Image (tube, helix red, strand yellow):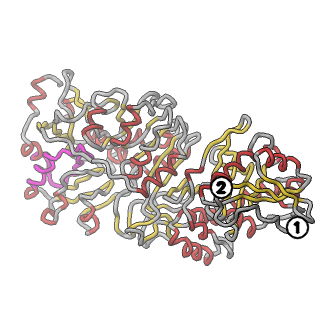
Amino acid sequence: MGDNDSYESRLSSADEAVRHIRSGWRILVGSGCAEPQTLVKALVAQAGRLRDVEVVHLLTLGVADYVNMEHVGSFRHNAFFIGANVREAVREGRADYTPIFLSEIPELIMSGQRRVDAVLVRVTPPDRHGYCSMGIHVDIQKAAIDSAKVVIAELSPKMPRTFGDAIVHVSQLDHIVWSDEPLLELPASKIDPISLEIAGHVSRLINHGACLQIGIGTIPDAVLGLLGNKRNLGVHTEMFSDGLLPLLENGNITNSQKSLLTGKTVTSFVMGTQKVYDYVDDNPSVEFRPSNYVNDPRRIARNDNVVAINSAIQVDLTGQVCADSMGYNFYSGIGGQVDFIRGAAMSRGGKPIIALPSTAKKGTLSRIVPRLNEGAGVVTSRGDVHYLVTEYGVAHLHGKTIRERALALINIAHPSYRKELLEFVKGKHYVYADEAVWQQAKNPYPGDWESEETFGDTEFVVRPVRATDERMLQEFFYSHDRYTIYYRYLGAKRQLGHKEAAHMCCVDYADRMAFGVFLRTGAAEKFVAIGRYDLDPRTNHAERAVVVGEEWRRRGIATFLLKRLAEYAKSKGIDALISEILIDNAAMAGLHRKLGNELRRIPGANAYSTLRRLSEEPRKRTSMPPPPPARAAE
């Protein structure tokens, strides 16, 4: 039936085509930037003859006049994902919202649970074999075309011809309307400083060879802009836009490490500008698949190292994520967030990430909250959340206690709200009564000082210590033998209790600083070394100390930490670093001499005082301060 006669026999005007729609039917409107606007306008123009027509869609950017007040009784909209064009109607009760995982919508339609009587869709003109392409949107449209009683197609020469499971034969189209209207476009948002900060933290979680799921918006675009140094990235995502193009064109994305559809960029729909539409046009390297394929967590997990980046409206202090409503007001939808969060979690080496600004409404509201707003729904459960990122850093929540979760989230909340958040969890007995994690709000987390370093033949992560590292620091302390404790603490020490460990981790990244060297296995970390300093503001000199775990010595870790502490302290305007070393700690004394640090014997004590000058013109002193008095062994 793909011959020219059958094709032309289906041609009609938009008005004639939509006259086949009957009262009481359910109509699916084609998605996003591929909305068939000519058909939608014709349908609304016939509102007077129709009653109780349900209009469903997965987010459209175009006209949605069927939700207008004057059409109540003729049409009622049901949103699988709420967009700006129908949000007011949903809020006022003139339209409905169906919360559902995007991966499950095609089956909802095909099973008849939400049967579709007619579908309005935009496709390419048929090729010489009679095949049209759904172009930039396949998502839930394919299920509707395959099961609807009536398929009305708007043929557009401006629709890109795409590959994968995007093909529909002209014989499946009952009525065809020619349209030369341009595709809708979704220009990229301007990247603001906060989004860029968030993107910086997210980008550090993405390794070479990662398989990306990334959405559309300011934060995703900012993340993509920071991945120019990554190699052999892959893409398996429900949607993408212009932000991916530089990585595709520059060869950062090769899809060579993927197990599923190796060498192919896999997506369900595209929303962006004409530039990205031109890229996917007639491009066999991009495969468009339906939502029940792309968003199936089991298929997602077949790829290793999946990094899924999604957003949220609110997160409570136990890790519950609200992403579709503001209190009782439904705002967007579940979409593919849970599909990809779970798929990434099941992926070997995968990282599910929720990224959001710490505040809303120009800083007047915290997005990290003691409890979700009344009426707010949980889209992603506390058990599903792994990484949560704001402009203040990364909180890794998976497998953590409620105490650890609360502290981690407070640590990346906006500084203005940390104290009240801490008081709340203290009142609920989630944390110790003397917790002071909010004090780490004095300065932003210095993410730029994170690095991956190789010592010997092993790769380690070096990063500033966070307040939430307290338990790891305790474990590190109790792993030491008595000689390490004696040399590090200048005497016998049997305990590193909560209060002391918390103080050591809750640095302010300026006057008090600590770097940890961590061995990372998957998402798990453990201390192998730590270096720290504490500033004496009277002298502008900081006392520093370094300890390396017994099995990791003689690899250059102590030298590295001493140098990094010096670099960081100098960047903060500190004039000198000092420390105390026991006389019989020959290894550390020798290291300081090798680094050119001054050593002086402390009168009356079995110890040296060392000095590392950082400034040629000290602000406080011009000579080495006298050594401190002898200290009693702890």
Task: Mark 2 and mark 1 in contact? Answer it, CB < 8 Å.
Answer: no
Residue 585: percent from the left, percent from the top? 88, 51
Residue 67 lies left or right of residue 364; in this view the side is left
> Residue 540: x, y in percent?
67, 65
Mark 2–mark 1 distance (CA, rounded to whole Å): 29 Å
Q: Please state if 433 lies on the left or on the right of 282 as rendered.
A: right
Residue 370 visible here: no
Residue 347: image quadrant is: top right
Query: Residue 487: percent from the left, percent from the top?
Result: 86, 56
In the rendered image, which residue does mark 2 sit on? 616
Residue interval drawn in magenta: 19-46
The numbered dot on residue 630 is 1
> Which mark is in front, 2 or 1?
2
Does the rendering let one see residue 264?
Answer: yes
Q: Residues within 10 Å of mark 1 (few under 14, many from 20)?
A: few
**Circle number at residue 157:** none
- Which amino acid type corresponds to the residue marked 2 in the rendered image? Glu
Among the two numbered marks 2 and 1 on one chain, the one whose residue lies closer to the N terminus: 2
- Within 10 Å of disc 2 (Cα), the crowding (few <14, some 14-19, many 20+) is few
Q: Nearer the viewer, residue 531 or 113?
A: 531
Q: Residue at x 89, y 53 (%)?
A: 483
Residue, x 12% and y 27% (percent of image)?
6
**Front-lying residue, 363 or 382:** 363
Using residue 359 as the reference point, say whether residue 275 is left or right of it: left
Q: Quadrant of residue 617?
A: bottom right
Image position, residue 459 (x, y; %): 67, 39
Q: Quadrant of residue 75?
A: bottom left
The secondary structure type at the circle numbered 1 is: loop
Left or right: residue 174 versus residue 247 is left
| Amino acid type at mark 1 | Ala
